């Protein structure tokens, strides 16, 4: 029998609802690389996107070229023993990008500050904004696909999905680029992926990282409304079976309703 049912907290819900000019370091973000140059700051205004649950709350942050990178820890890590997919969604608005492009958003395990896993790239190709995605190595870029047809100065929602699969070099990355609205269920076909690549798998994911990339490559991008979850825009329920054991499941509200109606 059930002994406890609780609504799970999102692993991160970052609205940058702080004063403009504050450092991200003052709000739970940890500087990783890049030193004190171009410190990551809270910038105004925040971004809006119709239908996105974190739209229009507080301010944002702005990534430029070179300088401080920073990560934020999840409330709890994601691994193949608990839930095997992590979803990071955020609003983005690019004011500039370059060719050949660079990555600005990625995930890392809680045991590493260097195993960048699921790297989201942006570049400008003849005036057209394009997104790319690799798993864990710059060498992956030799087979990287680009999604094209996007524009500067337009707010999109990105959803990065990293799926942890038992076994070596088989974890999958996917990227969904949303241009209007939020699909009620996960689209069958991502904008990019799912791709495995041959680079190293993360055993777990525990941090999201914002990166100010290489001068001459990196985009200038406003980032806002970062949500880390383990399902596609669903509220997640945690069920404990027998309080004294470690039997624990995370399922969606929809799955719980289906289960209880049997
Ligand atoms: Ca905000
Ligand atoms: Ca694996």
Image (spheres, rainbow, N blue to C red):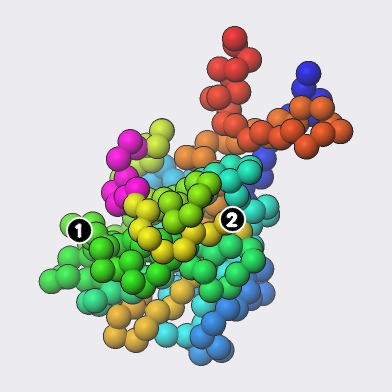
- Mark 2 lies on a secondary structure that is strand
Magenta extent:
187-194
Residue 90 image position (x, y, % from top left): 45, 56
- Residue at the image position 34 percent from the left and 78 percent from the top: 218
Identify the mark at residue 241; answer none if there is no mark.
none
Q: Is mark 1 within 8 Å of ligand 1?
A: no
Q: Earlier in the sequence, mark 1 or mark 2?
A: 1
How far is disc 1 from disc 2 in space, using C-alphas?
Answer: 30 Å
Residue 166 image position (x, y, % from top left): 53, 46
Q: Which residue is mark 1?
A: 148
- Residue at the image position 36 percent from the left and 73 percent from the top: 138
Q: Nearer the viewer, mark 1 or mark 2?
A: 2
Residue 47 image position (x, y, % from top left): 43, 59
Question: Label 2: few (<14), some or many (≥20) within 10 Å?
Answer: many
Identify the mark at residue 204; answer none if there is no mark.
2
- Residue at the image position 45 percent from the left and 52 percent from the top: 171
Query: Which corner quadrant holds the N terminus?
Result: top right
């Amino acid at each position: 029998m059930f002994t406890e049912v609780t609504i799970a907290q999102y692993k991160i819900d970052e609205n940058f609802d702080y004063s403009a000019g504050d450092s991200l370091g003052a709000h739970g973000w940890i500087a990783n690389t890049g030193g004190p140059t171009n410190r990551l700051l809270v910038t105004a205004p925040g971004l809006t996107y119709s239908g996105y649950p974190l739209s229009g709350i507080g301010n944002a942050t702005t990534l430029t070229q070179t300088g401080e990178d920073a990560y934020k820890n999840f409330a709890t890590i994601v691994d193949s023993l608990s839930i095997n997919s992590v979803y990071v969604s955020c609003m983005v608005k690019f004011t500039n990008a370059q060719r050949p492009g660079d990555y600005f958003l990625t995930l890392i395990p809680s045991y590493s500050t260097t195993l960048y896993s699921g790297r989201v790239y942006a570049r400008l190709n003849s005036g057209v904004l394009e997104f790319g995605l690799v798993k864990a190595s710059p060498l992956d870029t030799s087979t990287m696909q680009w999604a094209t047809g996007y524009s500067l100065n337009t707010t999109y929602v990105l959803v990065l999905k990293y799926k942890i699969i038992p076994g070596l070099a088989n974890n999958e990355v996917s990227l969904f680029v949303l241009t209007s609205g939020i699909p009620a269920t996960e689209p069958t076909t991502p904008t990019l992926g799912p791709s495995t690549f041959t680079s190293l798998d993360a055993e777990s994911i525990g941090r999201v990282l914002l990166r100010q990339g290489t001068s001459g490559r990196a985009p200038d991008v406003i980032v806002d409304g970062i949500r880390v979850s383990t399902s596609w825009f669903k509220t997640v329920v945690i069920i404990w079976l027998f309080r004294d054991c470690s039997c624990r499941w995370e399922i969606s509200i929809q799955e719980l309703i289906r289960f209880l109606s049997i």
